[in-house]
Amino acid sequence: MKVRKAVIPVAGLGTRFLPATKAIPKEMLTIVDRPTIQYIVEEVVSSGVEQIIFITSEGKSAIENHFDYNFHLDSVLKEKNKTALGKELDEISNLIDIVSVRQKKPLGLGHAIWTARHVIGNEPFMVCLGDDLVLSDIPCAKQMLDLFHDVGESIVAVKRVPQDQTYQYGIVEGEANGRERTFKVSRMVEKPAPGTTDSDLAIIGRYILMPEIFDILSTTTPGHGGEIQLTDALLALSKAREMYAYEFRGIRYDAGDKFGYLQAILAYGIRHPELGEDLIAHIQVIAETIRYCWK
């Protein structure tokens, strides 16, 4: 059973980045020289997924336009003999088959995923959140798809966090199952109160889900703010059939958070083939300046 489709929810308002996101989708904020969402799409494509379903809302057309062909821009670039840039943009518009589904009401992540049910059908699928970046040698999505090939069940990506930060995440409890970095899920807790769990395995924005999740989401009671929480549905799914947590190899950046966004710019910037060396040198100058000022 192959995972052919990936759902990428991009309907959120991006209020943490206002006023920058008043007119620009947060997923289109730039990391070095490309929008955040492009890194996620490229990760999915390089992992072998065949189709992406964007879950959108009003004001998100810039995301769809970015991955579409722009005849006027292409003509201008050809007139100015900027063939390399034109080729790059053409490759972006042909990365993968993309479908957009509108989330008509802001009813939470669980509801956003549920809106993709008719496009997904009765097959397993991946979910990648639109502001979670993972920098790794092997794409995080590929790592999870390789594990799915072995276990054939739902998988949530996790990372270890300090115990005093577990209240900020959905936390997975489980036991190692013999596969490297893999745990069989026994319990999930959304933002647990301090001292209520010993686990430090925090869920991040990568999932592989079995299609039964749609029936569960359709009967999930809305929680805080009237939103349908994905974690509640995941817990129900884990009770109905096996589910695994995978501690991926790589570094995750929350590009939906201002500090995480800055960290991502630096992390991707120092790896940029044209800018990396100069950026590293500049960072070293800044570090020396800070040390001098603090003496």
Image (tube, rainbow, N blue to C red):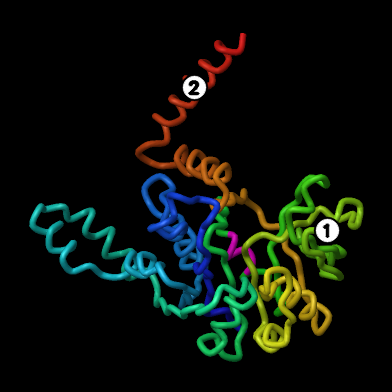
Number of the front mark, 2 or 1: 1
State left or right for residue 232 relative to residue 23: right
Q: Which mark is residue 286?
A: 2
Residue 137 in sight: no
**In the image, residue 215 above or below residue 178:** below
Location of residue 278 (image quadrant): top left
Residue 42: % across, % down: 45, 62
Magenta stretch bounds? 140-144
Query: Which amino acid lies under the numbered mark 2 shown in the image of this protein?
Result: Ile
Label 1: how many Cα within 10 Å (few below 14, some 14–19, many 20+): some
Question: Looking at the image, which residue is at 82% across and 69% down?
Answer: 185
Question: Does the magenta segment cover residue 166?
Answer: no
Q: Is residue 286 visible?
A: yes
- At 42% across and 36% down in the image, what residue appears? 276
From the image, which quarter does the C terminus lie in?
A: top right
Q: Which residue is mark 1?
A: 192
Secondary-structure class at tag 1: loop
Amino acid at dot 1: Pro
164 lies above or below 78? above
Asked which secondary structure carries label 2, the reply is helix
Along the line of sight, which residue is nearer the eye, 20 or 5? 20
Q: CA distance from mark 2 to mark 1?
A: 39 Å
Q: Residue 77: horizontal and vertical position, in percent? A: 15, 57
- Residue 55 falls left or right of residue 61: right
User: Is residue 93 placed above or below 242 in the rendered structure?
Assistant: above
